[in-house]
Amino acid sequence: MAFGVFIHRSDSIYDDTPAERYQFPRQYLERAQACVGDWTIYYEPRKVPDTKGYYAVAKVERVVPDPSTPGMYLALIEPGSYLDFATPVPFANESGPIERGVLNDAGRVSGRAQAAVRGLSSGDFSRIVEAGLADDSPLLPRTGTADAGPVLREERAPFVVDEARARVASLVSRVVRDRVFRRIVLRAYDERCVVTGLKLINGGGRAEVEAAHIRPVEENGPDIVTNGLALSGTAHWMFDRGLIGLDDELQILVSRQANDQESIRGVINSSGHLLMPMREADRPHQQFVRWHREHCFKH
């Protein structure tokens, strides 16, 4: 088992769904197989406009031949393991590349940095994950104290294997994952409820909006921004109970089983559609929207 890097871009020509599978050609098979049972970091190349850099982490469950495309393979992601970073990590900072394994003996970036699948040292993995989970301006929760729960930032220590494994422990913590998910979803929607259109900040500087999973974690819904919505407490309650849902065009649907349909329609924003995030790549994915409509929404 070994850590790895998977290069992926939002306009990829490959049949990728980062939270579920990563498609790659035969030339990378051995490298991908080395990652089975361990964690890989997703990276968007620098040549992509507004690149996210290193932007997510996931655990590789197994590698199989792609049944639909001869010569291609799929790295299947362990359900529930994918996590978008709270803070995307750039390829380099003032000290140089954060992934030091891409440097050659002369200290320059080598051709290794172009490899779509590559191994990652324990030190590089730890360094990238620490930066990705860190958040210098965290969004405070609606309830509870600001210092509740584990702190993500730690004192710097030598980057050794044990530290990398400690990072892995944080990646499976539900408390950490919920905080990161809230951060990425509220940032994507500018802390505004996508149903009502309201952006309310309370007296303590906390956003009165919640990060909701479209497909719940309990139903193998991933912690990815495209499976999230920023919702007010009431809208979140109605969405979870299937009183409101979404069609394929992201028009907001009101259940016929709701006892006061007109009042519900009265709190929906004037467009009647979900308010879109600032980045098109952050929009709700159709597979999650359909899952909610088929398994949760009360027709």
Image (cartoon, rainbow, N blue to C red):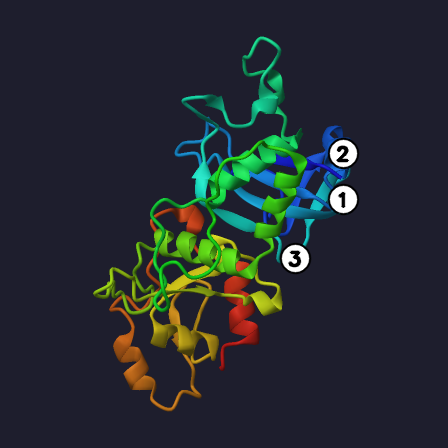
Quadrant in which the N terminus is drawn:
top right
Of the residues shown, which amino acid type is indicated by label 1? Val
Residue 211 falls in image quadrant: bottom left
Query: For the residue carrying disc 2, how many other residues have a C-alpha within 10 Å: few (<14), some (14-19), or many (20+)?
Result: some
**Rendering coords of residue 221 (x, y %):** 57, 62
Q: Say whether marks 1 and 2 touch (CB < 8 Å).
A: yes
Q: Secondary structure at mark 2?
A: helix
**Rendering coords of residue 174 (x, y %):** 55, 61
**Horizontal side of residue 126 vs 151, given as left or right:** right
**Horizontal side of residue 48 vs 109, given as left or right:** left
Name above or below for residue 268 compared with residue 223: below
Name above or below for residue 7 compared with residue 202: above
Q: Which residue position is annotated with label 1?
A: 63
Q: Which residue position is annotated with label 2?
A: 29
Q: Which residue is drawn at the image coordinates 40% and 22% (left, top)?
A: 94
Q: CA distance from mark 1 to mark 2?
A: 8 Å
Q: CA distance from mark 3 to mark 1?
A: 14 Å
**Rendering coords of residue 35 (x, y %):** 72, 39
Q: Which residue is drawn at the image coordinates 38% and 91% (left, top)?
A: 259
